[in-house]
Amino acid sequence: MATAKVLVIDDEKLLVKSTCMVLTHYGYDVKGALNGEEGLIAAQEFAPDVILLDIMMPGMDGWQVLETLKQNTVTERIPVVIFSAREYSNGKALAAEKGAADFIAKPFEADELVEILVNQLSASPDQY
């Protein structure tokens, strides 16, 4: 069975590194990107099964990245989980409205993140 691929896009280098380490421990093939532009390139080249995307990033923010991903035929079907340090009062609804598959607030527990990834991977069997 193939290993699920996860792309982590966040401008906080330590968070990307620690999230990648945790997800690797859980058996995922993980790649990190430190800004929106790098994330868009990685999404095409790495072809992840799921993308974890921060909102608050300099330059191209997460909403712009999400919109670009959803407009590209190569990346439009990849589930995107928004993860943001800012707790939006309607974070899950706003993320869904903009085309994201789910939302998780930072800081998060590893088990909670893995549960979301498992749900997204099982919801899109054609991707995995």
Image (tube, rainbow, N blue to C red):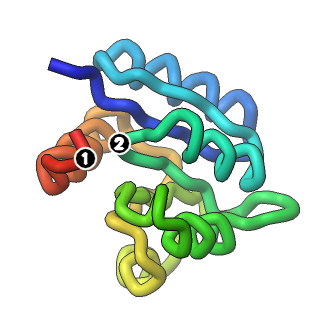
Query: Measured along the vertical axis of the image, is residue 15 above or below residue 79?
Result: above
Q: Quadrant of the N terminus?
A: top left
Left or right: 73 in relation to 125: right
User: 10 Å neighbourhood of mark 2: few (<14), some, or many (≥20)?
Assistant: many
Spatial distance from mark 2 to mark 1, Cα to Cα?
Answer: 6 Å
Q: Position of residue 108 (x, y in %)?
A: 43, 44
Q: Which tag, 2 or 1, sits closer to the chain's start?
A: 2
Q: Exactly how many numbered labels are in the figure?
A: 2
From the viewer's perspective, is 100 left or right of 62? left
Where does label 2 land, which residue?
49
Is mark 2 in CB contact (under 8 Å) with mark 1?
yes
Residue 11 position by quadrant: top right
Secondary structure of the residue carrying tag 1 is loop
Q: Which mark, residue 71?
A: none
In this orientation, which residue lies closer to the viewer: 25 or 107? 25
Q: Quadrant of the C terminus?
A: top left
Q: Is residue 54 above or below residue 113?
A: below
Question: Which three-letter amino acid code belongs to the residue tagged 2?
Answer: Asp
Task: Please tell me which residue is depicted at 58% across the width and 75% down the height of the picture.
Answer: 67
Residue closest to the eye, 6 or 15: 6
* Amino acid tagged 1: Gln
Residue wearing tag 1? 127
> Extreme front residue here?
73
Where disc 2 sits, the SS reads: loop
Residue 72 location, quadrant: bottom right
What residue is shown at x 73% (from left), y 66% (from top)? 61
Residue 31 position in % (x across, y down): 56, 28
Q: Residue at x 43, y 36 (%)?
A: 6
Residue shown at 74%/44% (left/top)? 38
